[in-house]
Image (cartoon, rainbow, N blue to C red):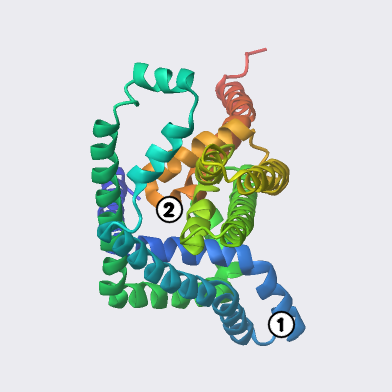
Amino acid sequence: MPTLHFRSFLLLLTAVSIAFVSILLPYYPAIFWGSVLAVIFSPVHRRLHHAFGGRHPSLAAFLTVLCITLIVILPLIFIAGALTTEVAGLYSRIHSGQLNLVHYYEQITAALPPSLQGWLDSIGLGDLLSIREKLSVGALQGSQFLAKQAVSIGQNTFGFVVGLGIMLYLLFFLLRDGPSMVPTLKRLIPLEDAHRRDLFQKFATVVRATVKGNIAIAATQGLLGGLMFAFLGIQGALFWGVLMAFLSLLPAVGASLIWVPVAVYFLVTGAYWQGIVLTLFGVLVIGLIDNILRPILVGKDTKLPDYVVLISTLGGLSVFGLNGFVIGPLFAALFMACWDLFPEAVAAHRQTQTEDDTSETPASEP
């Protein structure tokens, strides 16, 4: 192909690719999670495919999608509905004054010894009038935000249904046709076979480890934390449990951002057994789940240090939102994989250049 024709083709290819990606962007979450679920549940699809003797790939894909719907999507929809109701009730209690955060803060500061009260005064946290105003405004704004999110979820039901349908539709074809699509994708990447194989393997490993590991940890911590809050009689146990599950996506800190302040409140207000029980449960149960399971389920498979997992997760969440808890560690793992392959690629390139130079050197005359 002449140079002008080839460059024109590259320009056309770039233009149509940008146009196609811009068309897909509104449904990026559905496409992303459809691809992630296809990677995670591909072993289930393979087993069903083999169980049918390899003759009914569509039936195996349909049954896999049905399993995903029953064990993943429907429970999430149920939890989201219950959470919306609880958030609306929380907003109503804060707006009516039944839930007064200022009163809780005053109880805590009044129970502190004079030395700590003086320290709070020195850092500007002892002015109850100022703190009362800040907490009132913050509680009202926070509750309004939660209420708006709950209302927006209800108003965006049609968009949610469309996105869910696209995700399930795409998931079906990715499961059914995925094995035949992978070789085509590999051919489009201008790398050596070994490098392509390593990168695809790293991609699948990181997606499976990150999603399964983080979701398993978050669900376990949120469930146990919510049950403990319900046992202690704390209102909104479902809401706090879901919030702990969400914060559990952050390594090292996670759910402690919720249960530690509540335990401190119990201890300083005289509810000693509730505070001691919650503290022991948080340290020995919730904390150990994060410290033991996360390196096993996430760090071991991805071969990423804990600090890289933490930073990449935080960065991914800040850039991509909730989807970032997968995208962040995925980019970090691919970054480290590419740099691991870099010395080998440089050595191979130099060897190729040396061979080309040798072949181009004219043979010396006798």
Circle 1 SS class: loop
Badge 1 amino acid: Gly
Q: Is residue 29 visible?
A: yes
Residue, x 36% and y 72% (percent of image)? Answer: 163
**135 lies left or right of 304:** left
Q: Earlier in the sequence, mark 2 or mark 1?
A: 1
Q: Which mark is residue 235?
A: none
Q: Which mark is residue 322?
A: 2
Residue, x 61% and y 87% (percent of image)? Answer: 59
Residue, x 49% and y 56% (percent of image)? Answer: 240
Q: Is residue 5 visible?
A: no
Number of marks in the image? 2
**173 lies left or right of 107:** right
Instruction: Give the percent coordinates (x, y) of residue 350.
Output: 59, 23
Q: Quadrant of the C terminus?
A: top right
Residue, x 63% and y 34% (percent of image)? Answer: 306
Residue 230 position by quadrant: bottom right
Instruction: Give the percent coordinates (x, y) of residue 177.
Output: 56, 73
Badge 2 amino acid: Leu
* Residue behind mark 1: 54
Residue 124, above or below 155: above
